[in-house]
Structure formats: structure tokens, C-alpha cells
Image: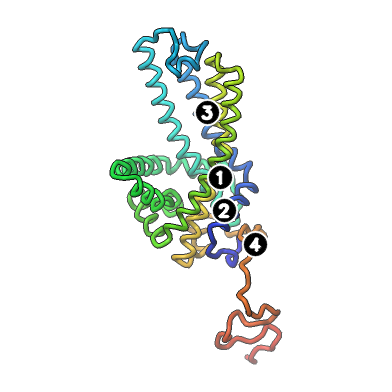
Amino acid sequence: MADQALRPLGVGEILDVALKLYARNFKTLAKVVLVVQAPVQLLSFVILLSTLPQDSLSDFGTFNTGSSTTVTSGSDTAAYLAGIAVTSLLGVVAAALAAAACLKAVSDAYLGTAPDWRESLRFAFRRLRSLLWLALMLVIFLVLASLAFVIPAVWLYVAWAVATPALLLEQLRGTAALRRSFRLVRHRWWPSFATLLVGFILAGIVSAVVQGLFVGLIFAGARDNGVLTLLLSTLGGLLAGVLARPFQAAVTALLYFDLRVRKEGFDLQLLAQRLGLPEPDSAAASFVPPQAPTPGADTSPGAPPYWPPPPGWTPPSAPGPEE
């Protein structure tokens, strides 16, 4: 992306750029999510299948609703609940890793460098411990805020929305990333809230449609087969993650860059150096739509950049002073 294309974006423009990044780099982003989540989903399927009471395998739906006439022992129930806990923990780790790798890939694409799914995964793996620590702090703080009232939890969630990009791209950790996000979102809370809300709704619609199709298959005939029900649920969750998670990462990354542009005069070359990226390709496609000209501004060739012209400015066609 060229330097001159980087500018403050409105809520609609952030979503538009996020969609473009998502569409143009979908193969790379899909590989990132698949490589991380497919093994975890497979392992979760095996764990749940092995802990599911044998009497419920032929009537999985009845087991879940509690209307089964088969008596399930306490040890079987405890094993099944333990399996759910383990798979949930694995899902949290996979989600954090996939989101971080997608953020890296989206950032590369936005800065004009072709993203690579292997490098994005290596980048995320190197920061996995910090990512998990940040996720744990977010959960604890947001749960405590929710116990007080819902509104403080929502406010904090938005205020800390770009903590993960700050941790990944600025080499910050833990509370430093939270403070960094708070400073960036400060005085831009409502636009940030609107951006995240619309992005969440769009990703939620896609996820709901995909999972709804698999739920329909389950109730169409697979409900009486516990193994098939579990398999369809696993596949539905995996496909929904592949489609929705990269877009959510793109929205978060674009919000982070926009806040830096607005508050820090974001310099593309400096950020590229801090990320360890090569110089952006001058031929890279710009994802940012051109800014509308100021009403009444002179846009003819050779016109000054602003009025009055800067001291010493001369039209390009005019000969310069003799040396």
C-alpha cells in the first residue's frame, strides 16, 4: 500500500477495506485457520467421542435433552464434562493462535507485502504465551466487570479491542498492551464500537448460516446417530471459523491502523521496519478508496498542494532557480 493512500477512514470505509482484504487474501487466511483449527477440531471430536456414554451413541439428541430412559452413571457424566472442558480449552488456544496469524497476514497485505500463511503461523506461535496471558486477563477483567454491570464490560471490551494487534505488532505484553489499546481508543470509543459491532454482526450472520445448515442436517435425520451428529457439529464449527474468523481479524487490524493514523501520524515506512517487513512494493494494490477532493480545490495539473502555496513552491513546468 502506498504511503499517500494511508489516511483516516470512516466506519463504512474500514469495513469496505476489511472486505477487500478478506476477499483478495481468502486462500491464505483460510489456510491459516484450517492448519490451526482442523487438528484441534479432530482431537476434540475424538475426545468427546471417547467420553460420550456408550448408551448415548445411538441417541445423542436424547442424551443432550435429558429425556433418555437410559440411566447414565455419574462417572460417565463426569468423564463427558471433563472432555467438554478439555476441548473448550483447546478451542480457546486454537482461536487465539488463528486470530493472531490472521492479523499478521492481514497486516502484511495492508502494508503492501504478499502475506504468507507459514510465516504468519510462525509469527503467532512465537507469541503464543503472551497471547494466552492477554486472553486470560481479558476474560478475568471482563467477567468481573460483568458482575458489576453489563455496561462497564462492554465499555472495557471496546477500550481493549486493539490490545492484541498492539501486542503482536509493537512487541508489547500483558497490561502494557491493554494500556496501549486504551490510549488508542480513547476519544474514539463510539466509532470503534460501531465498527466492531457491524463487523461482529456480519461475521455472526455468516457463522449462523453455516452452522444452521449443519443443524438442519442433524435434525433431518442424523439426530438419531450420536457419532454422525458429533461429526456434523465439528465440521460446522470448523467451516464457520474458516469463513468468519479472518474477517473479524481484518476488522480489528484495520481499526488498529486507523487509530494510529489518526492519533500518531502513522508512518508506513517506520511501521514496516518495526514489523521486520521488506520495503512495500510500489505496484501493490491500494485497498483504501481515494479521498474525495475538497470542494472548490484546484485539482488541475501543476496546481499547488494547498493554498496559499508553501514558500518557494513553483509549478512543475516552471524552470527552477539557476544554481
Q: Quadrant of the C terminus?
A: bottom right
Separation (CA) of disc 1 from disc 2: 10 Å
Q: Amino acid at mark 2?
A: Leu
Label 3 belongs to which residue?
A: 39
Separation (CA) of disc 3 from disc 4: 38 Å
Q: Is residue 11 left or right of residue 74?
A: right
Separation (CA) of disc 2 from disc 4: 24 Å
Q: Circles 2 and 4: CB distance less than 8 Å?
A: no
Of the numbered discs 2 and 4, the one sitting upstream in the chain is: 2
Q: Residues within 10 Å of mark 4 (few under 14, many from 20)?
A: few
Front: mark 1 or 2: 1
Residue located at (57% from left, 55% from top):
110
Q: Residues within 10 Å of mark 1 (few under 14, many from 20)?
A: some
Label 1 belongs to which residue?
A: 202
List x then y, in percent, for residue 130: 38, 43
164 versus 4 height, above or below: above
